[in-house]
Image: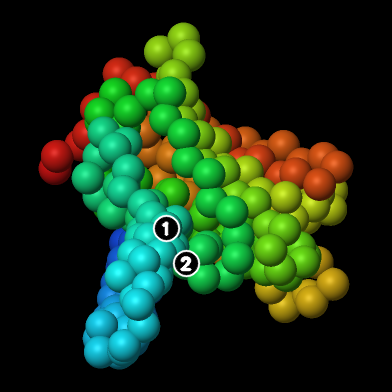
Amino acid sequence: LVIEYMEREKYIEDRSKLNVQRQHSRNMEQAVDILRRERHEFLNHLNVICAMLSSDADDKEIKIKQYMNKILGNMSKSCVFYNSGNVFVDGLLTIKNSVAYDKKIRFDVSFDAGFDLIKVQDTDLISIIGNLIDNAIEAVEQKVPKGEGVISVYTFSCDQYFFISITDNAGPIDEDVKKRMFEDKFTTKQNSKSVQRGSGLYIVKFIVSGYGGEIMVQSEDIYTEFIVKIPMNESIDEG
């Protein structure tokens, strides 16, 4: 029994590391896609401005200024920079905001407490937050009409605990799904009638538990909220 337990713990640890690698790979792919798209759009905008400069219109300076203001306005929405207390989380949120913007999903982020309050490894934070946001994006895409989706990320602290809240408006989760969604290898993605949940949640729970924390879900009406709770005095195992 001891050997079986140790083998299972090793299996879970290996799966957790693989999940982190997959999340990192997914983030890098999204970052490259964003850079490629923005480079293409930037060149298009330059060509338009050059053409406008070459025109004989008397009001070309006003039109160019209006065009550039519009470009800057769009950039401020699609490329947002954050100050969460962790530069890796900041980068992740910037990428996810751009992904959400492309999918016409409103992405709200608010920090009432910074990630510098907890001693959690950067890779674990990225895996936790990345998985939960990816699940929320997939659920919104599946169930909410385009342009009406909302995802919010909110952090706060209370009674020596640090909380990460990720909420979406993709509707409630079925009770039978809610009971099993943190089980190993469970996912609803094979069932097109259900909101897509469950991908990576077992690993998220495993990581959070390793820091003495827990993950909870609240789902009612049109909103679903995942809440990660981690003790603020928990330390990293450097070994």
Tell me the element at label 2: helix
Q: Which mark is residue 99?
A: 2
Where is residue 47 shown, x and y percent of the image?
Answer: 29, 88
Of labels 2 and 1, earlier in sequence is 1
238 or 80: nearer the eye?
Answer: 80
Q: Which mark is residue 216?
A: none
Q: Quadrant of residue 23?
A: bottom left
Q: Which mark is residue 73?
A: 1
Where is residue 205 shown, x and y percent of the image?
Answer: 51, 45
Label 2 sits on what residue type?
Val
Badge 1 density bin: few <14, some 14–19, many ≥20, Cα 10 Å: few
The figure's colour scheme reads rainbow
Quadrant where the C terminus lies?
A: top left
Where is residue 55 shown, x and y percent of the image?
Answer: 31, 89
Query: In the picture shown, does residue 87 fall above or below 186?
Result: above
Query: In the picture shown, does residue 9 fall above or below 20?
Result: above
Taking the image as drawn, is residue 29 in sight? no
Q: CA distance from mark 2 to mark 1?
A: 17 Å
Q: Identify the residue at horizontal 77%, vertical 66% (top origin).
A: 145
